[in-house]
Image: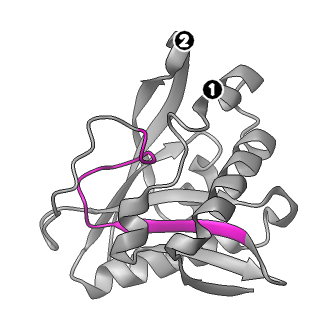
Amino acid sequence: MQIRRARPADIAEIETLIARAVMALMEEYSLEQRRASIGPLFGVDRQIIEDGTYYVVEQAGRLVGGGGWSFRRTLFGGDAVTNRDDSRLVPGVDPAHIRAFYVDPNAARTGIGTRLLLQSEADAAALGFTRYEMMATLTGVPLYARHGYHAGSQLLFTLPGGLSFPLVHMGKSGV
């Protein structure tokens, strides 16, 4: 397995990865919630790819994982999420945002999420960030908790058709 920065040419494959991961791995959510979340909530964020803070993991020539971090104020969601704020966070003052982790269902629980998380934290720390935060899915909470993240408040994201999709705010102090 090899980790590298995502490129715009990866976007179509990342979109396919997102849909597969959401549908197969997010069993804490109903089928209706999972279907409705792809696009309006879970989708590619081109800004973090452009910023060079989104990574993909390749195995045998195909993407098996993606995830990253951001120095932008937008905390979660792909391009379709409204109320985005792409202004910059301040290292040492604001927490870096851990973002958009997806793993191919056939490669789940093989350490891909951990590799992406450690890479994201290390790169954010190298730029002076000392704290991290995210909006995690119920599926992701155990992974992040194992790495020192603490659960905070829950957010009910409203999907088209009025469906609610619970997310959990999580945070961690660096060193």
Total tally of numbered discs in the picture:
2
> What is the x, y in percent for residue 100?
51, 56
Locate residue 106, reporting x and y percent: 87, 62
The kind of secondary structure element at disc 1 is: helix
| C-alpha span from label 2 to label 1 | 8 Å
Dot label at residue 36 = 1
The answer to whether 85 appears left or right of 81 in the picture is: left
Q: Magenta stretch: residue 27 in it?
A: no
Image point (71%, 21%), residue name: 32
Which residue is found at the position 54% from the left and 47% from the top? 43
Q: How would you rate the neighbour count of disc 1 (Cα within 10 Å): few for under 14, some for 14-19, many for 20 or more?
A: some
- Is 91 rendered above or below residue 138? below
Q: Which mark is residue 161?
A: 2
Amino acid under disc 2: Gly
Rendering colour mode: one colour
Q: Nearer the viewer, residue 32 or 110?
A: 32
Residue in the image at 51% along x and 54% along y: 44
Start-end of magenta stretch: 64-80
Percent position of residue 172, x then y = 36, 61
